Amino acid sequence: MKLLTLNTHSLQETHYEEKLEQFIQEIVQIQPDIIAMQEVNQSISASSAGPELLKGFFPCPQESTPVREDNHAAQTAKRLRAHGLNYSWTWISAKIGYGKYDEGMALFCNQTPITSAESFFISGCKDYDNWKTRKVLGIQTDGCKDWFYTVHMGWWQDAEEPFASQWERFETHLQGKKKELSNIWLMGDFNSPAQFRGQGYDCIQKAGWLDTYHLASQKDSGITVKGCIDGWHSFSESETMPKGMRMDHIWCSNAVSVQSSTVIFNGENGPEVSDHFGVIIQTDVSSVP
């Protein structure tokens, strides 16, 4: 099983159309089973999407924001269909981004329909106009009891919406599912560099979650962010600001056999299509309890 996560930056990214096509070409080659995306935008002024654009779409019961014509997830699914890849997909919006986008997250499943989807707040703030509002999105797919979540969390040191409180809400919601035999996969931008001790990364690890990067038999540097990006400017003059951060992760609730963990879309392994790089892992699905 191949799992891919990427913070897309989507419509906010410069040369968006070119980078979308580059992303599609890579996906056609590697064909991940599950794709988790964050910062998946659409223009709030765009027209609603028609039936053709909504092929393969599984609406999340908790979501009321309509999918619009320039929705990044919808456009991705459309282009993949043109290459013969029928991904089922779902999308939610969590907040207004940059004053002009419905900003949320999406999940894709290759050749298999989504059978269940859920979203819920992990931030204390639920104001759609507040950029610090955070949700997560999860799915189950046909014939698989595992849950797959796409995650975009806040910062450890945020005074209004600290990581620790968001993680506590997330963990509380997942407690029932963790007792089941199926696996839970948390995929995304955790805004928690693995290098920073005593912060978000350690918080997740201490809760018993397993970092697939460390489970992998083959791995690279794991660096998914270089330099200073949105949200990290307060660190730009700090001596502790690393040149590269491993802050995009794939966690699992049960031990699995992971063959490889690889950074993708970093300019070396695929073109740079966002201010984050992606992570793809390959695991032996038969090892899932």
Image: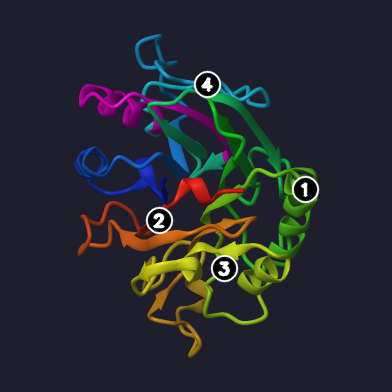
Q: Which residue is mark 4?
A: 58
Q: Amino acid at mark 3?
A: Ser
Q: Which residue is mark 3?
A: 192
The answer to whether the residue labelled 4 contacts the one labelled 2, judged by CB atoms less than 8 Å apart, is no
**Label 4 – label 1 distance at C-alpha:** 26 Å
The answer to whether the residue labelled 1 contacts the one labelled 2, judged by CB atoms less than 8 Å apart, is no
**Label 2 – label 3 distance at C-alpha:** 19 Å
Determine if the magenta segment contains residue 249: no
Residue 214 image point, x, y percent: 49, 71
Which of the two discs, 4 and 1, sits closer to the camera?
1
The answer to whether the residue labelled 3 contacts the one labelled 1, judged by CB atoms less than 8 Å apart, is no
The residue tagged with tag 2: helix, strand or loop? strand
Residue 210 image point, x, y percent: 60, 64
Q: Which mark is residue 179?
A: 1
Q: Amino acid at mark 1?
A: Lys
- Magenta residues span 73-95
The residue that appears at 57% across and 49% down in the rendered structure is 185
Q: Which residue is mark 2?
A: 281
Q: Is residue 219 left or right of residue 17?
A: right
Q: Is residue 101 visible?
A: no
**Label 3 – label 4 distance at C-alpha:** 30 Å
Dot 1 or dot 2: first in sequence order is: 1
Dot 3 or dot 4: first in sequence order is: 4
Q: Is residue 177 left or right of residue 189?
A: right
Which of the two discs, 1 and 2, sits closer to the camera?
1
Determine if the magenta segment contains residue 82: yes
